[in-house]
Amino acid sequence: MARFIIRCFAFVAFAAIFSAALLILWGELMPRKLRPNLPHPVQLYGFLDTRLKEADASSPVDVLFLGSSKAYRGFDTRIWASQGISSFNLGSTGQTPMQSELLLARYLHRLQPRLVVIEVDPVPFMDEGVESSLDFLANGPIDREAWRMATRINHLKTWNALVFGAWQQFTGRRNPLPKPQRQGPNSYVPGGFTQHDPENYQPAGYLPPMQCDPRPEQLQAFLRAVRMLDEESTPFVLVTAPVTDAFARSWIDDERLWSLLAPGHVHFRMQDAAMYSDSLHFYDRGHLNQNGVELFNRALIDSLGSRGLLRPFGDRNQAPS
Amino acid sequence: MLFNSIDFALFLPIVFLLYWMVGGSSLARRNLILLAASYLFYGWWDWRFLGLLAFSTAVDFAVGRAMESTAQQAKRKALLAISLIVNLGLLGFFKYFNFFAAEFAQAFSFLGMPMTTARLDIVLPVGISFYTFQTLSYSIDVYRGHMKPSRDPIAFAAYVAFFPQLVAGPIERATNLLPQFASLRVFDRAKATDGMRQMLWGLFKKVVIADNCAPHVHAVFSNHEAYSASTVALAAFLFGLQVYGDFSGYSDIAIGCARLFGFSLMRNFAYPLFARDIAEYWRRWNISVTTWFRDYVYVPLGGSRGPLLQRIRNTMIVFVVSGLWHGPNWTFMAWGALHGLYFLPQLISGTNRRFLGPIAPGRWLPTANEAARMLGTTVLVCIGHIFFLGTDMADVWATLGHLFSTSIWSIPEINAPALWPLIAMLFTMEWIARDHQHALERNGLSWRWPMRWAIYAALCFAIIMFMRTDEVPFFYFQF
């Protein structure tokens, strides 16, 4: 029996090495359709590669934005710069608290923000964080934080992406493609914002109710991120970006999530902070068009200003390069 | 707990080590460990139904003991009736109550006596169709005198709840499995290694083949009007592979897992994809259930003895009942009846035992005649799948009407580039191994270990690369 157990361990080790080698070979040679568990979405959506490269070279800023697509499509750093506030937008597609935690660990010291704006929405808290992790592992560095995120997510696709990403990084062939500034209707704006071409939304009317059921691991990641900010004495606020009226009303029980996230913290729920029109200020049910972005950012700056949260920003009034 | 879950990947080695190391040479201790592990395995899904399992076990154990203590035939018959009523009663209550209540109400309404019936909102305990049949086989075999009743409650409870085959079979005969609990198992490295290989192949069939066929089948059959007839036909074929991969995969994992603990379970699938006629198909498909119905329904009805009409009746009853076993729906019964009708010409012409031997013995490829027969059997089975998948009979007729339309000649619209090579791999591996118990039993065994291990590791890679990452329960759990 001992021999059987030893051989089992030996086979597991052999299979791990052999499978990793095949995974790399498969990832290098096969088209995406033939590698369903290794999507490796390089520069596929959200400009994360471009954004992270810019963040790596960026100097300290007044405000740092984190969150999902509502963040990188919602917080326009140019508007903040016009108010004398430097900022950087580290939002990414489907970013969950697990990825926000990773970004804070990587960039908090580099960007030294005086205020962190965390965009909060029920969806990322209900998500495993796998899709977003693939984005990070395909477009960001494979470092200790990436390993930590993969361990916490513990999903097959994430592990595959980590192994393949580590291989590409080791062989110096990480993201060799030219960095596009424009993809479809989306344009990357230096500072991390992504602008969508002018488009108006056709309101869908009724949307089925959605139960807000946050995952414990995302709540824990959020709390770890908050603790990190507290340890660095970096103030932060939570912001819920506006969405179309029907979409906002479709959530059931989101109050419970806010009560879990926001005790003792400032939480701006911007749905009613300005007069948004579904057809004039949105291009889909969850994202503002540029008219809406203008309205939202100015309302948020006013709200932050009225709470005295923007007061100390005097000496870093240049926009990020 | 699912076989294809992280929970089970941790559970199995822990139980394995406890069983062989803590269990030592004590039969009672080993059985106790298996019993505790089995109840943990079952309770992982829903602990509330452990009581049901324990109740069913206690009733049949007590019935067996009582039968032993009496020689009076009438008493023995009454005891058997108790076992049948309890087991079939539980099965009927949980699985068929709502169906029969609704059907009775509809029948009375049809006769001008409208009535309302209560509809119970009950959860079907997973595996109830499997373990009740297993305990029934014990009571019946004790009654028939085919075996002596168990005197060891722990061994008997472990036999009923044995976790590898508890929730989806193979449905074991007490005469085969129970004696194995009564004798001290000896660890056999060759058997355990072969068990691991069989589990690996079963896992591949489940998570790579079945789970990847499922979304295409679901997409087409949930809205078949939107697809061409050829697409519906291809989806019916994929459904066959889904069910085969799922169920035979589960059986392979169960059999392989049991071998790790020194048990031999009966074979449940014998390459039904290569069956040359319907009779052979049923000798190769879900063997434990098919033979259960043969031994406990068909034979008591008179079996193959008696005049032709009686044999036809017996055959049809068995097929319809086996259809009903799958669930409370007319579509399942119609599916069973259809297979019965497929079978009848062979029964009448006396050709139902034509293909008992190996397929294409000594040849690399089947002959044209064999290939045509396999294709014909596949087509018949796929038509049956339409019944199996239908939500009701109206849906079945609509799908069949759509299937036999001119769009059957169009190019199917299922776009699954990764799936076709995997299916080709399944067919190739199973074809090569068609004379063996499972696809990895002999394949490559004569090769040196690095080559052999590389093949197994390549299968692991296929699982890693192609498995669905959302948890897909085993299809037959619902039965």
Image (cartoon, coloured by chain):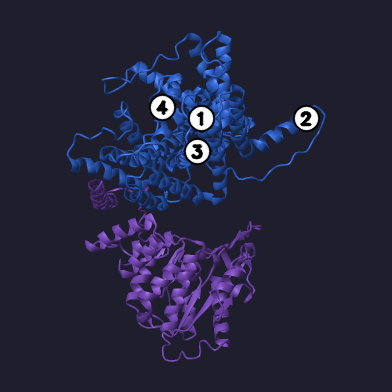
Which residue is label 2 attached to? Answer: B108
Position of residue A59 measured from the top left corner of the image (x, y, whole percent): 35, 82
Q: Amino acid at mark 2?
A: Phe
**Chain A: what color?**
purple
Query: What is the secondary structure assignment of the residue under circle 3?
Result: helix
Per the model, the C-alpha gap separating discs 1 and 3 is 20 Å
Q: Residues within 10 Å of mark 2 (few under 14, many from 20)?
A: some
C-beta proximity under 8 Å, tags 1 and 3: no
Q: Amino acid at mark 1?
A: Ser
Residue lying furthest left in this view?
Answer: B448
Position of residue B182 measured from the top left corner of the image (x, y, whole percent): 40, 36
Q: Is residue B266 above or below residue B12?
A: above
Q: Are marks 4 and 3 in one subunit?
A: yes
- The subunit letter for the residue under badge 4 reads B
Query: Can you tell which of label 2 and label 1 is closer to the viewer?
Result: 1
- Return the mark for residue B137: 1
- Return the mark for residue B476: 3
At x 55%, y 9%, the residue is B306
Q: Is residue A5 above or below residue B333?
A: below
Per the model, the C-alpha gap separating discs 2 and 3 is 33 Å
Which residue is label 4 attached to? Answer: B272
Q: Are marks 1 and 3 in one subunit?
A: yes
**Chain B: what color?**
blue
Q: Residues within 10 Å of mark 1 (few under 14, many from 20)?
A: many
